[in-house]
Amino acid sequence: MEKEYDIIIIGSGVGGGTVADVFSKYVQKGLNVLILEGGPYRKKGHFNQRENDMSSIYFNKGAFLSKNLHIGLAAGNTVGGSSAVYTGVSFRPPKSVIENWKSSFGLSFLTDDYVEQTLSEHEEQLNIKELPESYDNDNNRLFKKGANNLNIEIKRLRINVRNCQQQGFCNLGCTVGAKQGTLELQIPDSVANGVELIYNAWVHEITSHSVKFNISKAIAESEPNKWKEGLYEFGAKVIVLAGGVLQTPALVLRSLKNLSIKNKLIGRYLSLHPVFNLNAVYKEKIKNFRGFPKTYYIDQFSDTEGYYLETSFYYPGITAKNIPGHGKIHQDIMRKYEQMMSILILSHDPSEYHNRITIDKQGKPILNYKVNKNVKESLTKAIQRAAAIFFSAGCTEMIIPGTKKYLLNTEDKEHLADLIHSKNIQFERTPLSSAHPQGGMRMTKSVKTGVVNTDGLLNGTKSIYVADASIFPSSVKVNPYQTIMLMANHVANRIIANHFTEKNRTV
Ligand SMILES: Cc1cc2nc3c(=O)[nH]c(=O)nc-3n(C[C@H](O)[C@H](O)[C@H](O)COP(=O)(O)OP(=O)(O)OC[C@H]3O[C@@H](n4cnc5c(N)ncnc54)[C@H](O)[C@@H]3O)c2cc1C
């Protein structure tokens, strides 16, 4: 073995960064920790706000398509993982979800005290707060106006930024490093405390005590490699998988023989929190590329109709993808880009057995996902609701992908329920997407129903842990990163307790 570590963490996103942060407090006491990140190290100076260039921050340029082509997944492939591109919208997990995880899946560590204390500490660390109204852009103001006119309750989102310069291009990487994701916070802090980081280091396989990876050439707009390109195998007492929902199950499936485990639940019970982006056209210009892209949301229909509505701002390329039609029709709509307001629907999907990650012959992940019938119903209700908000805020046209009559005008606003129903929207032909995948390596108390135990230990192994969004037993129903931190923090503390305390004689 070329090098030996106490702990190797695979992935530097929200899960990987959180565990690295916990472990870094033990480095002074002798714990040696390495993070292997498959993507390049782009720092704030490498982000240029150009959609085409920045799409390379993501796996498959931001759209990892499901096998049936019904949905595209966005996930970061860079130091910081998806936290390098996320918007920083911060939700605590709903109490009802935590109660369900305790009662149905045995996650008894989620006591009120643990949840409250850990979330509060992270909120302090990440500076999670509501932004002042001066950060609202035109899009947010119109959302507020439309909802107020309809007496729908809107709430202010909590965001994790410091010194935000209101550039609005959060999903292409923050050029001033304002977002408090792992790229800006936990990774540099951990490295400063002595944790090692190797980037451009793609892990192909693991065994129970080693990691096999390849260091590739650094891309031009990123930090140079400190290690030579080539194949490596490093040893570790403990390995923590934090490659995210798409890649962690794939890595385990590639490594099954080495680990001598069998578990038909690996990769299953996936939920994607499907997102539907809607646009409407107004007479006036709408300035969205300044201010903060998201400051309001609506959760009033979460329990009854199964979705949240949030404000959003998308760039011309991604908007073009979200607009139906082609040729002149598409061009005519896109010419009105500067007059467009946008609303994001986030629907609650169940974690179903058949929705899963598998691998192809090369060991690459395949996303198998069917949009559930109830999710289509709830998306339809959400589109009706969003349409009402657009029109009550004064839009002249609203665009609905996946329908024959995809342009609604002001005369249609009295007939929204007739025009928007699940029978005339072909969700399979819409740009449905996901940025919040969860599950696949389900955490449960019983080994019969899950993939990892309540410490995050991969069932059937003694030293492989999982600490990313894949361990959620079901969808958390809100933007997930605070919950990922909550879960990863627990896994990191259990690793220390199980392997590196005085009693266990390692540190
Ligand atoms: C555009 C966008 C906007 C979002 N906005 C929000 C938001 O506002 N609020 C919110 O709560 N959530 C948001 N999210 C979701 C949130 O960012 C993710 O849920 C979260 O980052 C997932 O954490 P993770 O640790 O599971 O995986 P990730 O953060 O995706 O990290 C996984 C890392 O592992 C690396 N990796 C994977 N496989 C390997 C391998 N084999 N070898 C080496 N490295 C590997 C990847 O390159 C990646 O860096 C957003 C996501 C996207 C894409």
Image (cartoon, rainbow, N blue to C red):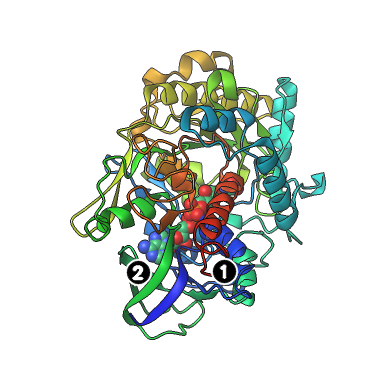
Dot 2 falls on a residue whose secondary structure is strand
Would you say residue 291 is visible in this rendering? no
Residues 444 and 244: in front is 444
Q: Secondary structure at mark 1?
A: loop
Kind of residue at disc 1 = Phe
Query: Residue at coordinates 49% horizontally, 38% vertically from top-left?
Result: 275
Residue 170 screen position, x and y as percent: 61, 56
Instruction: Report crowding for label 2: few under 14, some 14 to 19, many 20 or more residues within 10 A (C-alpha).
Output: many
Identity, as a three-letter code, of the amino acid under mark 2: Val
Residue located at (66% from left, 66% from top): 177
In-front residue for pair 150/456: 456
For the N terminus, the image quarter is: bottom left
For label 2, the residue is 211
Quadrant where the C terminus sits is bottom right
Instruction: Give left or right: position of 19 versus 350.
Output: right
Frontmost residue, 279 versus 187:
187
Point out residue 278 in the picture as x, y percentages from the top left corner.
53, 36
| Residue carrying label 1 | 47
| Circle 1 or circle 2, nearest the eye | 2
x and y percentages locating residue 157 in the rendered image: 70, 41
Horizontally, residue 191 falls left or right of residue 498, namely right
